[in-house]
Amino acid sequence: MTLLLALLLFGSLLPAPRASAGDPGTGTGTMATGWIVWVEPGTLGDPGLQQALAGLQARSIAPGGDQLVIEFHDARQAADRVARLLARAGIRYLEPEVRYFFQYEPNDELFAQQSWAATTRLPEAWDLTTGRDDLVVAVIDSGIYADHPDLAGKVLPGYDYLRRDPDPDDEVGHGTAVAGIIAAHADDAQGIAGAAGSVKLLPLKVGDASGASSATIAEAIYAAIEQGADVINLSLGADTPSATLERAIDYAYEQRVVVVAAAGNKPDAVTFPASYARTISVGGAVADGTALAEFSSRITRVDLVAPAVNNLTTTWSDAGPGWGTVSGTSFSAPIVSGTVALMRSVQPELTVEQTRSLLTRTAQPLQPAGQPGTGAGLLDAGAAVRQALLPSLARTWQVADRPVSEGVVQRTWLWGPYAFAVRTEPYNESPQGTRLVAYYDKARMEVTEPEAPQDTPWYVTNGLLVRELITGQVQVGDTTFLPASPAQIPVAGDPNDTLGPTYASFARLLVVPPLEAEAVIDQTIDRGGQVGADERLAGYGVLAGPLIPETNHRVASVFWEYLNSQGVLYQGGEYLTGALFDPAFYATGFPITEAYWTRATVAGVVRDVLVQCFERRCLTYTPDNPEGWQVEMGNVGQHYYRWRYGEPPYEPSPEDPMAVTLRLS
């Protein structure tokens, strides 16, 4: 209450100066006739409160009706009524409406290229997604010109909070410019490509050339949440805080809706709402991202920066729709909003803090390090979106391999201790023609459709690597292959083994008829692919197991037992016992060869090893190994990477899915 009395004493009820949206020098002001009243729950019907509000225009802002905007006729009436309201027991809090201003600087110079997308590495993100078409970004701004050719068909029905009607037309052009950066159509042979070109836009008009009130912005935030917005963009601000606006942002945070706010265009001034801890606050960088823009706030709390100088986007004026360049943190914020929409498209369950962590951990620091206003550095959209997808891979890895990693159980790895390489690879049937892959010692994880539902066991798959290694055909689509040579890499044993078969050794054995049921396996294979028999090996008692009709091969008994075994798993945040493979061929695929014995060098010692290749993995059985390690997955992931790219790294990737996920915990 002391603050409110001070405002009354020092004349803050006087009208705020009006300013155009492009005036960077005007960033604050309290409205003369608008106050926000917070009442105790259940007291709105109190006769005394109703008498105090008699004759005044009042409307509810927040769900539950405990926040009201009261409009007074003039400053004198406001002073009188506010003083009376302060004395009432049912009043929790009062504050004047604060006027917030759009955070951009006018610039009418037109550029022929969209540099902000390249600077923030958005094309790398677009390799995985351009956004789900059911994901909604709310643009709380001056409205959107919905008929702009680069926005047509993607602007949802919105609302004009100034006129209280469902026509949020843009009289300023600011909201249209913001909208284009977020979600202008991509691949439509005109204009620009928005950061998230496939998402929908929800236009909530809260201001015009004179700015927007804190009460109206808060009201629009609640409405955006109610209408299903995943991301809210606030390219506006002032140096005066508003508890009402902060509470609305807190509510969005609690509902896991990400609020992105512009850091402001006055280097020596703080800007709200960007300074609130629960927003993603975005400062402005120069066009190439190498330095902070001269106008970007050095005082506001900043999470990261994005280009804010001469950003090419959609425009709207009395002359009609077009494209042009604009400057200001108003136009760095929507680059981040679009990137967050991409992140949410591939990982819908990200919290606000997980989103912030991914954005800031992947940002590229500006030099010199630690300068005010730069936050973690320049947005790297490609890395942020890629890492947003990695928890899906980590969830797959930890089911079988977390118990091994943490020493809960002693057995062979299903994938390997970590991913040594994470990258994208071309794949024709992926929506963007590219899929995310992670290479582990034993296999490669793949996400071919990043926007698909993640509650199926096939969202993350592992490739048909063994078939490719044996046939020498690199698969780049469901039915598309690039010719190579069969891999001359040992299937089993040490990497430098010269005795056992390579993948190429099996090329002529893919169509060999299966053994008889229950036959004792004593057949052998050498490096040249020659098949023989050794009666000595019958002593191991391995039998030809069930016939798999899809590929007409039998599974050796030791491998069939392994594929149907139980073990300790990590699921639902706890350790439990269950099937290691469900379904049985999930990890391996179907068998594509029979099982053969060979002599191979294992840990420097020549040993008997049984080898059988499946579509995705090769399994080995080494009788001399200790229990739990006799049946193992071969190092197919390492082998494939060496065949396709060269020597694999022998250390965790900086983007190892489990490491990234643990940092988000």
Image (spheres, rainbow, N blue to C red):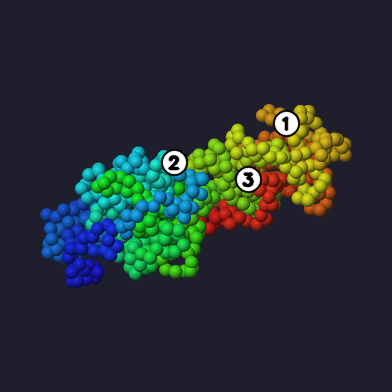
Badge 3 amino acid: Arg
Report how far apart the C-alphas of labels 2 and 3 lie in the structure: 31 Å
Residue drawn at point x = 36 percent, y = 43 percent: 150
Badge 1 amino acid: His
Position in image of residue 244 (x %, y %): 28, 59
Report how far apart the C-alphas of labels 2 and 1 lie in the structure: 47 Å
Mark carried by residue 553:
1
| SS for dot 1 | strand
Mark carried by residue 444:
3
Which numbered disc, 2 or 1, marks the residue that appears first in the sequence? Answer: 2
Q: Nearer the viewer, residue 316 or 284?
A: 316
Q: Nearer the viewer, residue 518 or 385?
A: 385
Position in image of residue 276 (x %, y %): 36, 62
Position in image of residue 47 (x %, y %): 15, 55
| SS for dot 3 | strand
Badge 2 amino acid: Asp
Q: Is residue 82 visible?
A: no
Residue drawn at point x = 76 percent, y = 50 percent: 495
Question: Total label count?
Answer: 3
